[in-house]
Image (spheres, grey):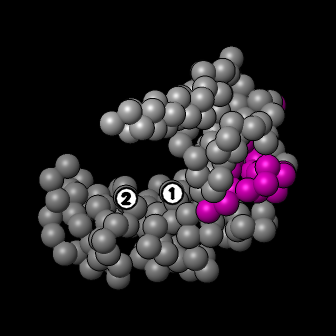
Amino acid sequence: MKYSLLLGAIIISMAAYSQAWTKQYDHVDECTCGLSLVGKDDKHGFVDKDGKLVVPLIYEDALTYSEGFAAVKLNGKWGYLDSTGKVLVEPKYTEAMSFHNGFAVVSNGNDYGFIDTSGKIGIQMIYENASQFSEGLAAVNKKGMWGYIDTKGREVIACKYGFAGTFGDGSARVMQNSKWIIIDRTGKKIADSER
């Protein structure tokens, strides 16, 4: 009994000690890809699982790591860091999203496209808007209408919808003629949808 109480006290004190470093930040996100996004006084950086600062608190904004990369904002522009905290893409984009299916949405202020995990443009910046890849497809907006492209940049479902959501479990919600419907990965309507 005495030993179990002592063991319990040691475990509790170790857990409290291991998390003591979190108190020095205004927020600490969940650890992904070995690093946690932290923030203090409107500046953001990343720490390892033990609270050691890996990326200094110099960024105006940042997104949690996804697929080994994190979008960070410096001097009003977005770029990307790799999982070691090194700069993959210098901050130059007006908007940036997290990586999904090996691509991240970026914008130059006028158009949207996708960069790949090497940091280079993988799908040209020719869209008015775009959302992240999910199940190998991404919703894109061209001439005011939404459709879907694959990871090669090919339009696989025509841009003919008023809005298009991300795919999940093989289907997505889209707005067609002011009504919400559910389509499959070929663009075929499978059901009506309530908003």
Q: Is residue 113 visible?
A: no
Residue 192 visible, this angle: yes
Amino acid at dot 2: Gly
Task: Report x, y in % for residue 74.
Answer: 79, 35
SS category of the residue bearing label 1: loop
Assess disc 1: are there few (<14), some (14-19) or many (≥20) residues with their C-alpha within 10 Å of its C-alpha.
Answer: many
Camera-nearest residue between 41 and 54: 54
Q: Quadrant of the N terminus?
A: top left
Earlier residue among tags 1 and 2 = 1
Question: Bounds of the magenta span?
Answer: 67-89
Residue 75 occupies quadrant: top right
Instruction: Name the amino acid type tagged 1.
Output: Ser
Name the residue carrying label 1: 131
- Badge number at residue 165: 2
Location of residue 150 with respect to 194 vertically, above or below: below
Task: Check whether the beta carbons of the residues at disc 1 and disc 2 lie within 8 A of each other.
Answer: yes
**Dot 2: element:** loop
> Is residue 82 shown in magenta?
yes
Q: Is residue 73 above or below residue 66?
A: above
**How far, Cα to Cα, is label 1 from label 2?**
8 Å
Q: Is residue 18 magenta?
A: no
- The residue depicted at 72 percent of the width and 67 percent of the height is 117
Q: Is residue 149 above or below residue 98?
A: below
Q: Is residue 120 above or below residue 91?
A: below
